[in-house]
Image (cartoon, grey):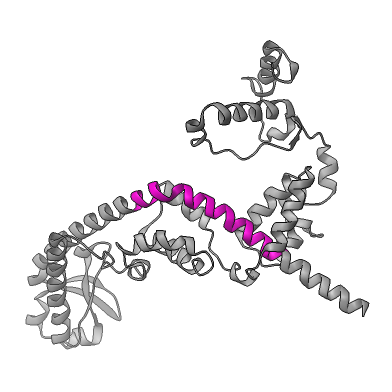
Amino acid sequence: NIHNKPIDQMLEIIDKSCGQNSKIPSDLHYYPEMIFNVFSILEYIREHDPIQVENLSLDDPWIFQESKNMRYNKDLYKELFIFTLEEEERSREKSTRSIFDMFTNSTGMNRLGRRCLSKYLQSPLTNDNQITQRYDDLEAQKIPSQFYTNIIDVDQYLLKWKRNLLSERLFAKLILQYKELSTQYPKLNVLIEFIECHFNLDNMQESNIEYIKNPSNEYLMWLNAFHDELNVLNNHGTTHSSLSFHLDSANIENSSYSITTTKWNQMSNDLKRKYRMISNKNTVKHVMYTEYDDRLFLLSDLNEKLKEYRKSYFETISTQVLEKYNAFLHSFHQQLGKDSMNSALKSFFQENDNRNEAMEF
């Protein structure tokens, strides 16, 4: 019996709050008794089933102290103007900056820091030791705030990665961001070194197809054949200086040569008949040398094989990295968000202290 309430009575409360005829609450903070139940269940799982704890991904429940949740007045909390009021957000009229706006907008705090600060402000501490520890963490922050300002939202990238929605290019962007961060967080080096054993991240970010460092012999054979065919097509354009070859990487069979209308009109009819018209515009025409149609089909087939190999290889390595380093990255992102927040806040407080001292002087 949690909270000294019989189970039937608690079930009745839950049914009234979230039953079939009730709207599911968007904010559980309005149901402190239910919050306490969730918290108690989580604590029980942590104590008795450590394996299941690894599958839990829940934020800490609303403030509780000595096994009792903090009771507070929601409207009064809003009047503290810690966050911009919902009414102003909807009307897009922000005549007065909230405390959150003041801290984040004037400090250049990145998205990770903003997220961490928002969580802190929505969950005010009541324990003296924990409050003191937060002050100590702020004071201990040594990395300058400028280091964190332009960090990409690695949380969103990691989320897309977990959902298999992160492209090769964005994957490379994320890992290169980790590489920049490794100057202050050397523990990232093991992860980066593992990935760089397999991928050329600069090529990957630039969408250069040659980003796999140790591909199979079959892949290299396809790649060499692809370049040989591509060279033939490019050389034809070089031989006929008026032609310029354009590779359509999305659909290679639609690749073509471009030529100005003036140059096209100067060509003999016999030469024109060797080309099929793809696009006939006033100033520029797109044509294809008919004898090279088979080469385009071969080039397209090779390209599909290369793409399929790269996709499979990328997914394999990406999955291995995620399985091995998921917990590490989750922990690091939390630290990075906290450090981003503390660094920006420390800079803010120092600048304002210096300004106040100058005014007093």
Quadrant housing the C terminus? bottom right
Taking the spot 74% from the left edge, 38% from the top edge, the residue there is 63
Of residue 229 and residue 32, the one placed in the foreground of this image is 32
Residue 322 visible in the picture:
yes
Query: Could you tell whether 184 is left or right of 287 in the image?
Result: right
Q: Position of residue 21 (x, y in %)?
A: 65, 20
Taking the spot 47% from the left edge, 47% from the top edge, the residue there is 327
Q: Position of residue 195 (x, y in %)?
A: 35, 60
212 in magenta? no
Relative vertical location of residue 312 with respect to residue 169 in this rendering, above or below: above
Of residue 361 and residue 151, the one placed in the foreground of this image is 361
Taking the spot 24% from the left edge, 87% from the top edge, the residue there is 262
Magenta residues: mostly which secondary structure?
Answer: helix
**Residue span colored magenta:** 318-345
330 in magenta? yes
Residue 84 visible in the picture:
no
Q: Residue furthest right?
A: 360
Query: Could you tell whether 20 is left or right of 75 in the image?
Result: left
Query: Could you tell whether 46 is left or right of 160 in the image?
Result: right
Relative vertical location of residue 92 with respect to residue 276 in this rendering, above or below: above
Quadrant housing the N terminus? top right
Q: Position of residue 185 (x, y in %)?
A: 52, 64
Q: Position of residue 147 (x, y in %)?
A: 59, 70
Give the quarter of the image for residue 151: bottom right
